[in-house]
Every structure is written in C-alpha cells, then in structure tokens.
Amino acid sequence: MKGSGSRPQRVAEEPCVPARRRLSVLVTAQRPSRQQRQGRYVPESMKHPARMLPAIAAHVITDYTGPGELVLDPMCGIGTTLVEAIHLGRDAAGMEYETDFAHLTLRNLRHAQAQGATGTARLVCGDARNIATVFAELRGKVALVLTSPPYGSHTHGHVRSGRDNGGGKIEKTNHRYSTDPGNLAHRGLDELLDGFGRILAGCTQLLQPFGVVAVTVRPIRVKGELIDLPGRVTETAERAGLVLTDRLVALLCGLRDGGLVNRASFFQMLETRRARDKGIPACATAHEDLLLFQRTTDLNTDRE
Ligand SMILES: C[S@@+](CC[C@H](N)C(=O)[O-])C[C@H]1O[C@@H](n2cnc3c(N)ncnc32)[C@H](O)[C@@H]1O
C-alpha cells in the first residue's frame, strides 16, 4: 500500500468529525462507572478488578473505526471493548485468560445482543501471547485493537469499612484476577511488559493497513515510587513494531459547574494520602493515558 491515496476512507471522512472529537481530552466519566454499566452489563461484571469505562471504549471505537469494521481486545476481561463495539455496529473479537471472566464476557455479549446490538463477536479463552495463531483467520482484518494491560492490583477492588461490617477491619474484595500465576497480572513488571509486548506483536500481525492500536494505561505508585507505566508501555509497543502516533487523556473524573468531580477509589485516595504523609506531593490519578499506535511499516510506506 503506497501513499495517502490508498489510505482507507478515514481521511475522506475527516470533515464530518465533530470539532470536540479532534481534542486530546476525552470526557468519559460524566457518569460513574456503575451507572455507565447499569442495565448494559450483567451485575456480576463488577467483580472484575479493573474494567475499562464503557464511555472510553465507545469513544475510541467511534473515533477510530467505521460500522462493520473489526475491533479486537486481546485481554478483554468482562468484555467492555467487545460489548461497546457490537452496540456500535462493529464486529468484535476478544481473548481472556481467566475462564470466569471469559464467561462474563459471553454473558455480557448475549445481553448486548438481546438489547439489539448488531455486531458479531467471537471470543477465545486462553493466553493472548499466542493471539496471531489463535486468530490467524483475522490477519489483515483488524481496524482497531483496544486494550488495557493488568497492573496495580493494590489500587483495585471493593472495600468494606468498619462501618459496613460492624466495626471490624477494612476488608478488600475483588482486587485480584485469580490465584493463577500464569495470569500476566501476577508477574513482576518486567515479565508483565514482556508478555504484553508479545501480545502487541501478535496483534500487529492482525491489523489492517493503517489500523490503530489503542492502549489505556496510567502511571502507578509502588511503595510510594512513581512508575511511568505509559512510558514503559510505549517502549514495549515500539519493540513490537508499532510507533506512537498520539497520546490522549481519557478523564476518570467528571466535569460539573466548572469543576472536577472526584471519582477516585478508596484505595487511590488512601495511597495518595500515604504518599503525602511521606512528603511526596502526590495526586490521585483522575485520567487514563490513551496511547495510540500504528504499524511502523504502514507509516514508513506512506512516506515513500
Ligand atoms: C485490565 S484487565 C482488562 C479489563 C477489560 N478492559 C474490561 O473492561 O473488562 C486485563 C485482563 O487481562 C487478562 N490477562 C492477563 N494475562 C493474560 C493473557 N496472557 N492473555 C489474555 N488475557 C490475559 C486478565 O485476566 C484481565 O482480565
């Protein structure tokens, strides 16, 4: 494929894109996560420790694909990317390592179809490090990969305070994906990134020309130390044959009356307070970095 003349219709469609869609800040948390899912996902979905906000998925899918195109999430959790894709008339494919979450994805997809979602979906439960083989028939067909790596289980989960459980200790639930050490969430950061790199390399083989890989990720604090996870993911993606073509902000806080509405979790606020107690002027993260990549080979060819 050579030159911008052969570029898919996306460029031709540009003039129709509303101005707000050209801005680098996505207003995606006007409603809290629970409200965004209510009636749209089965209630058990809340058990997953780290779901993507449905509004983030819907925004990205609307912006980077057209109806009928294929959206892939190699680490699909309870299926947010897939559900929002089929509601928007896109087709979807996903992989998830954990059987329980894969079942929840299936239930969420069936629920979406019962509500009138028109896209088709396919799902495989397994290790996405093999995704290029598992989905070999999708080679060259994926318009958008939208995913988020598992990380930071210390900031995940639900909390029952002493007030809720009759004065007992604070209880944390749903903060782990499973006890399976094979889940990349349970590996150290270097191993997690190595596995994520293999997954991205596999997805890259499935992309259509000028397809987009979108990764949501945020900086994390481990024992007070700030880890630039978006930076590490960018390096990982570059080693997998991708190039960073944009870096946006998806809000996790609301906007109301000219101010921000805090939607940070109990654990995020606790972590921030602990860092501040140590003299580190930390803030609770109120946005996801949305990293957008394309294949190095597509862009090089385009410049010829
Ligand atoms: C951050 S969560 C994704 C959540 C998802 N975006 C959603 O909204 O439900 C990352 C997921 O990756 C899964 N995972 C971990 N290692 C994996 C692997 N090797 N292959 C596929 N999925 C994996 C985890 O079980 C977890 O559900």
Image (cartoon, rainbow, N blue to C red):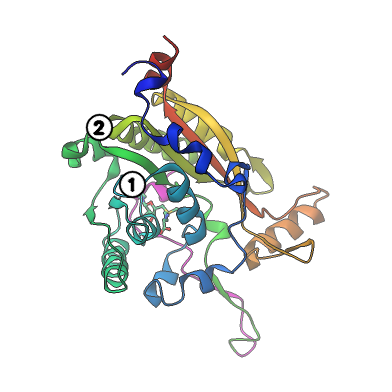
Q: Which residue of the protein is positioned furthest toward the bottom in this rendering?
A: 166
Q: Nearer the viewer, residue 111 or 197?
A: 111
Residue on which the image places disc 2 = 140
Q: Nearer the viewer, residue 187 or 136?
A: 136
Q: Quadrant of residue 300?
A: top left
Callout 1, which amino acid?
A: Val
Image x and y of residue 168, in percent: 61, 84
Q: Quadrant of residue 284?
A: bottom right
Query: Which quadrant is home to the N terminus?
Result: top left
Q: Is residue 189 left or right of residue 3?
A: right
Q: Does the magenta run of residues contain 185?
A: yes
- Specify start and end residues of the magenta stretch as a single range: 166-187
**Residue 96 visible at all:** no
Residue on which the image places disc 1 = 71
Number of numbered markers = 2
Q: Residues within 10 Å of mark 1 (few under 14, many from 20)?
A: many
**Mainly helix, strand or loop, the magenta region?**
loop
Q: Does the magenta run of residues contain 244?
A: no
Identity of the residue drawn at 54% across and 52% down: 152
Q: Quadrant of residue 79?
A: bottom left
Identity of the residue drawn at 37% across and 18% down: 297
Q: CA distance from mark 1 to mark 2?
A: 12 Å
Q: Which residue of the protein is positioned furthest toward the left in this rendering?
A: 137
Callout 2, which amino acid?
A: Gly
Per the image, label 2 sits on a secondary structure element best described as loop
